[in-house]
């Protein structure tokens, strides 16, 4: 039985623990968690998560250790776990912008590191997670962690030198999508359509459109054309989006996101 530990029991850590506990994996693992807020860990008792009193206890009990903390505090966490990190420990970091070299520098030189960029839809079992690893991690060890994220949604393996660039694509993009959605819902309110109706219809449109991207076999450009009748309403709206250089705005958004990731890694 694998002992899996979590340092940090915020939204993302909690989502991953719930995903493990409620899946077939839950029968083969023992979950442990530490968080300065004991209430957060106590609330996970129904998911068979053992409460630990310190980072030290997590490190001593677990081979797989998730660092489910913000980038701004990960240095302090790494310093706390460094004395208890061994060459057999597998560190799984979900801190945006933090690379395996930084983790090795703060712990031990031959530490095993798996980097993960998840997103908040993990809370609903609909996550989209990107994973990479350093060369110390074995295939079997990586398989254990990859399987965890597959049961919480979709997971893709990428090169570790692209872990900062991927943040805009799946990690931060839910916030960008929500802002986009807000524009439609605000418009609905301005013309007398209730927010409830607008949210329901637009959210379903997002779900359906996503399915068309993944399942229809058509390219993005082809899908746009399928909705756009000559001289129709869709083209009238698209013209304004093209005038506003929407794709360029999105590119700038992603570049700013990536730039910040590199700043956090220093």
Image: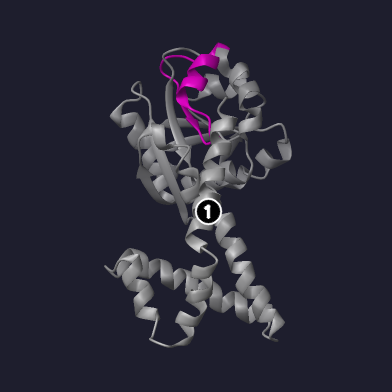
Residue placed furthest toward the front: 243
Rendering coords of residue 85 (x, y %): 51, 16
Task: Identify which residue, 43 or 112, lies in the foreground.
Answer: 112
Q: Quadrant of residue 80?
A: top right
- Residue under the point 61% across and 17% down: 79
Q: Is residue 18 above or below residue 250?
A: above
Q: Is residue 129 magenta-colored?
A: no
- Residue 253: percent from left, percent from top: 55, 51
Q: Which residue is drawn at 37% across and 43% down?
A: 147
Residue 265 visible in the current orientation: yes
Residue 232 as seen in the image, left or right of residue 216: right
Relative depth, front residue between 196 and 240? 240
Q: Where is mark 1, residue-wise?
A: 173
Query: Residue 102 lies in magenta, yes or no?
Result: yes
Magenta stretch in the rendered image: 83-106
Tell me if residue 105 comes above or below residue 182 in the rendering: above
User: Which quadrant holds the N terminus?
Assistant: top left
Query: Residue 14, located in which quarter of the rendered image?
Result: top right
């Amino acid at each position: 039985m694998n002992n899996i530990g979590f340092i940090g029991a915020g939204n993302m850590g909690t989502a991953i623990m719930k995903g493990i506990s409620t899946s077939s994996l839950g029968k083969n693992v023992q979950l442990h968690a530490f968080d300065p807020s004991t209430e957060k860990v106590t609330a996970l008792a129904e998911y068979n998560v053992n409460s630990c009193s310190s980072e030290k206890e997590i490190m001593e009990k677990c081979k797989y250790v998730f660092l489910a903390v913000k980038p701004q505090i990960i240095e302090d966490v790494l310093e706390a776990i460094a004395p208890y990190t061994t060459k057999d420990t597998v560190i799984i970091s979900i801190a945006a912008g933090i690379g395996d070299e930084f983790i090795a520098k703060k712990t031990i030189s031959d530490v095993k590191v798996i980097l993960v960029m998840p997103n908040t839809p993990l809370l609903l079992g609909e996550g989209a997670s990107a994973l990479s690893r350093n060369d110390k991690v074995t295939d079997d060890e990586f398989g254990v962690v990859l399987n965890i994220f597959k049961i919480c949604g979709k997971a893709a393996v990428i090169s570790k030198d692209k872990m900062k660039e991927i943040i805009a694509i799946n990690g931060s993009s839910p916030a960008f999508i929500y802002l986009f959605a807000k524009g439609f819902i605000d418009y609905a309110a301005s013309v007398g359509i209730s927010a409830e109706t607008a949210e329901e219809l637009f959210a379903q449109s997002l779900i359906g459109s996503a399915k068309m991207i993944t399942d229809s076999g058509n390219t993005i450009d082809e899908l746009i054309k399928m909705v756009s009748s000559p001289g129709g309403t869709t083209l009238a709206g698209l013209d304004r989006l093209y005038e506003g250089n929407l794709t360029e705005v999105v590119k700038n958004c992603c570049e700013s996101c990536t730039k910040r990731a590199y700043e956090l890694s220093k």
